[in-house]
Amino acid sequence: MNTPPVILITGALTGIGRATALAFARQGGRLVVSGRREAEGQALAAELRTLGTEAEFVAADVRDEAQVRQLIDRAVQRFGRLDIAVNNAGTEGQNGLLVDQSGDNYHATFDTNVLGTLLSLKHEMRVMRAQGHGAIVNLSSIAGQVGIAGAAVYVASKHAVEGLTKSAALEGAAHGVRVNAVAPGPVQTAMLDRFAGSAEARDGWLDTLPTRRAATVDEIAATVLFVAGDQARYLTGQSIAVDGGYTAQ
């Protein structure tokens, strides 16, 4: 490709999304970053531009189809195409035993993690199928590959993301569109602390990993860049666990 790729990232304001945006910017990618907080989004776009690339923030809630459609269309209007999309927006919801779960928590978690991914895929695929190329990376989790006691709703939502990834890959393959997932294990983010519930629980979980540590956001971002890039052009319909060996045990 003669011009730098155009990349869209949802949930880009913190954690893995932010690290991924910075990593793409350092490689010269032109970016549309999205999230729900205007001031933080504009600050991120300005920071990305200091790295010598073009970047724009578009506020959007991935649970709202009109906003998702507008987000995708804005990226195409600005840059003329959409080469890579990273669907990172997500929530851990309220963890707890299954017998204590509520319909409200189910809807709050699934609306962001599953509906948000579905709507993003729908409109990204709409553009990418028409242009005849594209790579989409959904952020899943090891919770999409195994069970975790006390996190049934979150686990179920990430299993759904894995299913969406496989089905979208099958629909996109004939049109030059690749769809994969990156499935992190524990990552050094605020979400990990919330998910674990306490420092003791977090450290105890990390001690069960062969690597005995959490990943950094930059390590996850590097995997996203590889999966989305031309070096992985024959990779589609897969979920890449980046988990320090957790799921190998």
Image (spheres, helix red, strand yellow):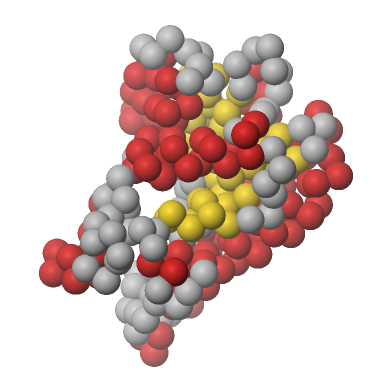
Residue 140 versus residue 2: which sits nearer the camera?
2
The image quarter containing residue 136 is top right
Residue at the spot 54% in from the left edge and 19% down from the top edge = 30
Q: Is residue 150 left or right of residue 206?
A: right
Q: Is residue 207 above or below residue 81?
A: below
Residue at the spot 35% in from the left edge and 19% down from the top edge = 47
Q: Is residue 236 left or right of residue 149?
A: right
Q: Is residue 238 left or right of residue 151?
A: right
Q: Is residue 60 above or below residue 99?
A: above
Q: Position of residue 165 (x, y in %)?
A: 65, 56
Count of number-bearing discs: 0
Residue at the spot 48% in from the left edge and 42% down from the top edge = 223
The image quarter containing residue 23 is top left
Residue 101 versus residue 66: which sits nearer the camera?
101
Q: Position of residue 249 (x, y in %)?
A: 40, 74
Residue 117 versus residue 74: which sits nearer the camera?
117
Query: Is residue 210 something one can see in this rendering?
Result: yes
Query: Is residue 61 something one can see in this rendering?
Result: no
Q: Is residue 48 left or right of residue 173?
A: left
Q: Position of residue 208 (x, y in %)?
A: 27, 71
Q: Residue furthest right?
A: 174
- The quadrant of the picture occupied by the N terminus is top right
Q: Position of residue 133 (x, y in %)?
A: 76, 32
Residue at the spot 51% in from the left edge and 67% down from the top edge = 144
